[in-house]
Amino acid sequence: MKAHDVSLYSVIKRNARLYKNRTVLISGRQEISYLEFLEKVDTLASGLQAIGLKRGERIGVLARNSLEFVYLLGAAARMGAILLPINWRLCREEVEYVILDGSPMVLFVDPEFRSTVSHLVSDAPTPIDWFSTRASSHEFRSFSELMGKNGIGPDVNCRQDDRCVIIHTAAIHGRPRGSIITHQGLLLTSLQLACSWNLSQEDVGVAMLPLFHVAGLLQLVSVMMAGGRSILFPGFDVDVAVKCVEEHQATVFFEFPPMLASMLDKAEEGGRDLSSLRHVLGIDHLDTVKRFEEITGATFWAAYGQSETSGLTSVAPCSEKPGSAGLPVQMAEVEVVDESGNILEPGELGEIVVRGPQVFEGYWNMEEDTRHTFRDGWHHTGDMGRIDEDGFLWFEGRALEKELIKTGGENVYPAEVEQVILEHPMVTGVAVIGVPDLQWGEAIKAICVLTPGSSLSEADLIEFVAGKIARFKKPKHVVYVNELPKTGDGRVDRERIKKNCGEA
């Protein structure tokens, strides 16, 4: 470790010294102080070392938010290992792909997801040590087994450019890509947000976004860096959310539609007070944002980011430029370029590119994709946008090569859904697009061509898709047409399809 290095574990050690008995984590009736957190992390790291885990190896986690999940994040940082959080909303085949791609040496699984991965206990091509996040479950060992070790070996001297987390993003070519986020990336992004919001020891975050999502990690680490506390929940529950905000005087909340709207409805219905909130970050309808700010007096922050940029590229109060994606964060250089890589003038539409210390290292096991993404010395986001005269970024959709639907905070690539739909014997052609949806932001719509003379109900096709990939990727709307419009070179004309079928 060099004089200029810092890691997530450095922050954990620092906070244990500065804040000692202040609460950092609350889960149910358990409250963990900063000093206790450091002790738990060191003990767990000792246990992981005892079973042979080494620097650079992956720790897989298929679990909902919990104290154990956060301890694993800290222990990985302590050892120079890499956390591999797995989206538990994925179907069995998708979870299997992420595990085999990330090749963890050890995998922690919530009991409710044991059946999703139990077949891999004996079938995995490389040995995996299997642990339950709770008590042991059949062939899985107990988490507590790792917490009985005393002491810890020498510091592994984790560097700031070491790999911290691998988050698998949506499947652009039919398979998820693992974004490698470094300690530097996660810490710098969290620090910039903490500074922008003037977070302090008094701030309280309600952590309901899953920690397999970069936004969930960003909220947790930002509050932690400021010495505040986070209240962990296994998932979003509107009744629990409004009660928690009022009782704990929560100040920070990250959300995706329809979380905020449902909280406002529930608060008004039950007479709950949400006025302690100071900052909410997310993607939502402007009418919901306006209603939220009028009721609470808090600030709703519009933002743009990806796993590839450690979660945040631009951010600003939504009220400053309603509809925009905010201003570039302090340490990010953001431009818009044409197809040749030339930087465009303000107001011109092009691909959003980013560079700076929070940009990810690259894609796990995908050198060609990484080279393509980093061409011309920039991270090419695959998203289209423009920058106005005041420097605000405006998101304007996705580039053709990275067509993307964002539904309820989850990324879905049309190509992945189309690939599954074409497996149905009655479907000969398909185009999948995103359409506006009041509840989820965007919904998935499939425009399909059937084999001559066949008949297939929309509901049956939707369930066919849901049986093969994660249910949040299934179409909400299905339309049957005689043929799909084509461009001059024979490709499906997506722009015409969007124009003709772009409504829900």
Image (cartoon, rainbow, N blue to C red):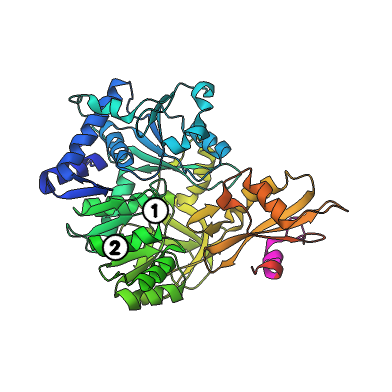
- Of the image marks 2 and 1, the number of the one nearer the N terminus: 1
Which residue in the protein does label 2 denote?
245
> Residue at the spot x=51%, y=24% of the render?
124
Task: Specify the label residue 209 is tagged with.
Answer: 1
- Asked whether 193 or 3 is in front, the reply is 193
In what quadrant of the picture does the N terminus appear? top left
* Quarter of the figure with residue 492: bottom right
Q: Is residue 266 left or right of residue 8?
A: right
| Image x and y of residue 258, in percent | 46, 64
Q: CB atoms at circles 2 and 1 under 8 Å apart?
A: no
Residue found 20% across the figure and 29% down from its top? 155
Tell me where residue 313 sits by quadrant.
bottom left
* Position of residue 181 measured from the top left corner of the image (x, y, whole percent): 38, 44
Three-letter amino acid code of the residue under disc 1: Leu
Mark 1 residue element? loop
Mark 2: which secondary structure?
helix
Q: Position of residue 319 (x, y in %)?
A: 36, 76
Write the start and end of the magenta stretch as one range.
486-499
Q: Is 7 or 28 nearer to us in this picture?
A: 28
- Quarter of the image for residue 93 reads top right
